[in-house]
């Protein structure tokens, strides 16, 4: 058997005890586990997505599809459809335009500044949607803080203008991350420099080089933002209901809670089914558009094909932090966005939570903890415990479900993964009504029905990180295990599973956060004694309890903010660990040289280990690009072997 010990490239593997020969990880033939995993995934998809949608379609077409279409096009149903399409289109245009502009500006900054700006742009995404909508109403709405103390008010906040503004602020990070990830893995810099060298101006470069390369990511970002708007419930409920502005999601909620008429329930099912169909059409259409395939550069080699100096922004060294450039327009605009979208609203929530009553100034003489005491009384503590139990249960099960998709085999993993992702795209209101119709006769009034909806909706959060990690695992690991006599199950357990642990942890963390503050499905499926914390917060807001609602909203914000901070600190620690391995020029080589191996082999091995830990999310793609950039900078510094090169390596280590 041939082997290269630095890069772990092995020759043909000998058949193992099960008679299976050449093996590709990700497509490991797992013997009896493979059909079992396929059956398990297919059964879960049928139970969690197909059955609810089938029952929803059955109810909607009970009086014939003609009457269903007529019901959708009449009265308030048609108004809700128009409002949803209008809000979705406006938010998509604004969020994608602003997110793309932010990505083009931020991703050309030096590495250290780029990381900080990314965290700042993504900050509003960490706030639960309800918290964002309610805090905006208290900060910028009628009789809000800005109105009382600055005599400024956001016109039309309670209505479509406010909904579009808040949803744009919440969706902008999604568009930014999708576009920035594409910039990080495509050879933008050296192509743009080539165009500028040929005499093209900035506008011509954007039109002929940058935007063609970004066409597919922009379309993907637009589809993602539009689907997010159709799914949105909390912001339209908080900012639109007082003005009588209804979207499809708020109409489903109000009809289900305020009407017991069977015909009204059938119309509700029609609206919910139309929401699901709208989302699936948008996703399918985005894949079929010519731009979805155009402009795609062989991106996995983009960072390799582009010279390091061309891809890397000019680093100004340690004195850059004292430069007036720190007040550049990019930093100022990002700071204003974070301050107005999340900072001021959160401070307003804190002020309302510690103030004795609405309308009082948040001065120390008016401070009190009575709002927190009132907020934690009654059903709040049981609801909090119930939310934690449901969230933990989902966080345990969802990554295992994602692992089952990965174990299904390479040929079936992609179609099964696509089905899981489409289940995530189904609007929460539609999925909740379908689950209620399908399983309500047995589980009405039980928290188990909420857990079923969570699993169907959040499955993709466990699948996507695992699928990305599987694609990056070196096939040679599995071949080596099988060549050593390990069976299919043992090879998968000993080579694949350890590499998937970071992905499983990320999936569990994401599921825990989303399940903790999930509101759309919980507000439809809860019964007496099964309220979740998000439902209790919504009830307090509808009762007009501003102080208690603010206190609960802060409590609801703790899990996502804590997880976001932990992930940011983990990334920083990982970056520092990678920077600590950079060797200064003239220093002795590490263990690779001691073993007589070429240093490039050792670097290949370390790069492979870093990639195993990386998840296929926009943030991780960006982090991986930064790490590659820093490593290449260190390599160029080492090869130079001069004092100037040593200074450059030190700058790379300090900047990350």
Image (spheres, grey):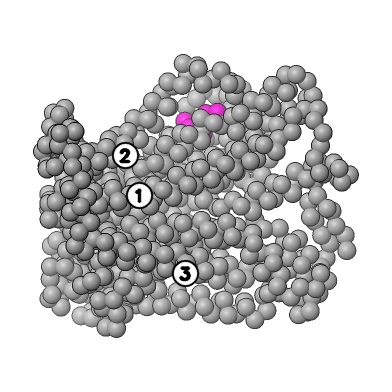
Closest to the observer, 275 or 569: 569
Relative to 195, 342 lies left or right: left
Residue 342: image tag: 2
Identify the residue at horizontal 44%, vertical 47% (top origin): 564
Of labels 3 and 1, the one closer to you: 1
Residue 558: image tag: 1
What is the magenta range?
103-110
Measured as percent of width and height from the top left, residue 142 is found at 12, 39
Specify few, some or many for label 2: CA neighbours under 10 Å numbering under 14, 14-19, or 20 or more.
Answer: many
Relative to 591, 294 lies left or right: left
Closest to the observer, 538 or 429: 538
Pointers 2 and 1 in contact (C-beta within 8 Å): no
Give the spatial CA distance, label 2 vs label 1.
Answer: 14 Å
Identify the residue at horizontal 35%, vertical 59% (top origin): 516
Residue on which the image places disc 3:
397
Residue 4: image tag: none
SS class, disc 3: helix
**Marks 3 and 1, the one that precedes in the sequence:** 3
Q: Quadrant of residue 345?
A: top left
């Amino acid at each position: 058997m041939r082997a290269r010990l630095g890069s772990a490239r092995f020759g043909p593997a000998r058949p193992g005890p099960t008679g299976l020969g050449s093996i590709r990880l990700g497509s490991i033939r797992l013997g009896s586990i493979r059909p079992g995993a396929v059956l398990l995934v297919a059964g879960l998809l049928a139970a969690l997505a197909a059955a609810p949608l089938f029952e929803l379609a059955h109810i909607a077409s009970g009086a014939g599809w003609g009457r269903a279409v007529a019901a959708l096009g009449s009265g308030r149903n048609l108004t809700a459809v128009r409002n949803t399409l209008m809000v979705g289109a406006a938010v998509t245009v604004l969020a994608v335009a602003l997110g793309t502009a932010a990505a083009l500006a931020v991703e050309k900054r030096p590495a250290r500044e780029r990381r900080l700006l990314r965290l700042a742009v993504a900050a509003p995404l960490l706030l639960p949607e309800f918290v964002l909508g309610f805090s905006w109403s208290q900060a910028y709405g009628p009789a809000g803080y800005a109105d009382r103390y600055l005599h400024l008010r956001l016109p039309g906040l309670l209505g479509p203008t406010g909904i579009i503004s808040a949803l744009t602020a919440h969706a902008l990070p999604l568009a930014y991350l999708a576009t920035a990830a594409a910039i990080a893995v495509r050879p933008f810099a050296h192509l743009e420099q080539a165009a500028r060298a040929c005499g093209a101006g900035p506008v011509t470069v954007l039109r002929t080089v940058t935007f063609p390369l970004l066409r597919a990511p922009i379309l993907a970002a637009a589809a993602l933002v539009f689907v997010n708007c159709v799914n949105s419930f909390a912001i339209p409920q908080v900012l639109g209901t007082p003005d009588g502005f209804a979207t499809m999601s708020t109409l489903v909620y109000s009809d289900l809670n305020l009407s017991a008429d069977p015909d009204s329930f059938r119309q509700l099912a029609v609206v919910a089914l139309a929401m699901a169909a709208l989302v699936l059409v948008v996703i399918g259409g985005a894949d079929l558009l010519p731009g979805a395939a155009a402009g795609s550069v062989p991106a996995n080699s983009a960072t390799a094909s582009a010279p390091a100096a061309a891809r890397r922004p000019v680093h100004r060294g340690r004195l850059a932090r004292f430069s007036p450039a720190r007040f550049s327009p990019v930093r100022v605009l990002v700071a204003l966005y974070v301050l107005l979208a999340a900072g001021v609203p959160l401070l307003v929530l804190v002020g309302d939570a510690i103030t004795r009553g609405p309308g009082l100034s948040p001065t120390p003489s008016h401070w009190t903890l009575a709002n927190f005491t009132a907020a934690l009384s009654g059903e709040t503590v049981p609801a909090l415990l119930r939310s934690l139990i449901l969230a933990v249960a989902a966080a345990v099960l969802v990554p295992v479900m994602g692992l089952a998709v990965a174990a299904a085999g390479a040929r079936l993993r992609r179609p099964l993964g696509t089905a899981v992702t489409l289940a995530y795209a189904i609007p929460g209101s539609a999925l909740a009504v379908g689950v209620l119709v399908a399983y309500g006769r047995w589980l009405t009034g039980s928290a188990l029905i909420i857990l079923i909806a969570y699993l169907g909706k959040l499955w993709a959060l466990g699948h996507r990180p695992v699928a990305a990690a599987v694609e990056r695992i070196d096939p040679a690991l599995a071949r080596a295990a099988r060549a050593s006599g390990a069976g299919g199950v043992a090879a998968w357990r000993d080579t694949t599973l350890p590499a998937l642990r970071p992905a499983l942890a990320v999936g569990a963390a994401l599921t825990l956060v989303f399940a903790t503050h999930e509101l759309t499905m919980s507000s439809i499926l809860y019964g007496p004694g099964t309220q979740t914390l998000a439902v209790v917060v919504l009830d307090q807001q509808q009762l007009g309890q501003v102080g208690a609602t603010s206190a609960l909203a802060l409590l609801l914000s703790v899990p996502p903010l804590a997880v976001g901070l932990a992930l940011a600190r983990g990334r920083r620690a990982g970056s520092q660990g990678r920077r600590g391995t950079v060797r200064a020029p003239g220093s002795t080589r590490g263990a690779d040289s001691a073993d007589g191996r070429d240093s490039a082999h050792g670097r290949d091995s370390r790069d492979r280990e870093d990639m195993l830990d990386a998840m296929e999310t926009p943030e991780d793609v960006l982090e991986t690009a930064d790490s590659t950039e820093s490593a290449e900078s260190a390599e160029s510094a080492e090869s130079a072997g001069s004092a100037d090169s040593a200074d450059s390596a030190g700058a790379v280590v300090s900047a990350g």
